[in-house]
Amino acid sequence: MQKSLLYLFAGTGISFLLNYFLLGSQGWKLDLYYGFAFGLAWGTAYFLDDEKFALPQKLMYSFVAMAVLIVIGLLVFNMELAVPSLIKFSMVFVAYYVFASFRKTKSLRK
């Protein structure tokens, strides 16, 4: 769990800095929100990369994380700005498991 939180904060920070300074800022709040989507996906994927979670549980937890992103996005921004965070979350989450599938253990944790 601690490493998952580390990935959440590291992913948020790295993505925010890249978006804000290198890729063209859309405002620091929106860049931080999109960075949080990246970090949340990375941390969630790492947390769920364990045998103790069945596939339905992984699906449920990822949907809960996406719901949290949408709620935050709707409270702070509007729907047009909240939806790209789901796309970013989904891309990072799926990419984590695609990379894991190339390993013999089917996990990036081991």
Image: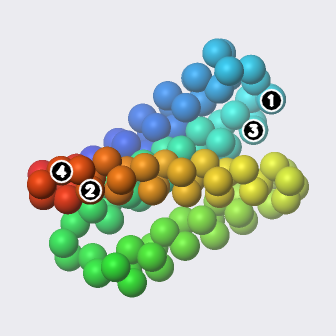
Q: Amino acid at mark 3?
A: Leu
- Kindly identify which residue carries mark 1: 26
Q: CA distance from mark 3 to mark 1?
A: 6 Å
Its colouring scheme is rainbow
Name above or below for residue 21 compared with residue 6. above
Name above or below for residue 104 compared with residue 23. below
Q: Amino acid at mark 1?
A: Gln
- Kindly identify which residue carries mark 3: 30
Q: Which one is earlier in the sequence, the residue at label 1 or at label 2?
A: 1
Q: Are marks 3 and 1 in contact (CB under 8 Å)?
A: yes
Q: Is residue 94 left or right of residue 98?
A: right
Q: Are marks 1 and 4 in contact (CB under 8 Å)?
A: no
The image quadrant of residue 45 is bottom left
Q: Are marks 2 and 4 in contact (CB under 8 Å)?
A: yes
Q: Answer whether residue 40 is visible to the viewer in this image.
A: no
Q: Answer whether residue 74 is visible to the viewer in this image.
A: yes
Query: Which SS class for mark 4?
Result: loop
- Kindly identify which residue carries mark 4: 103
Question: Which residue is the extreme one toward the top?
Answer: 22
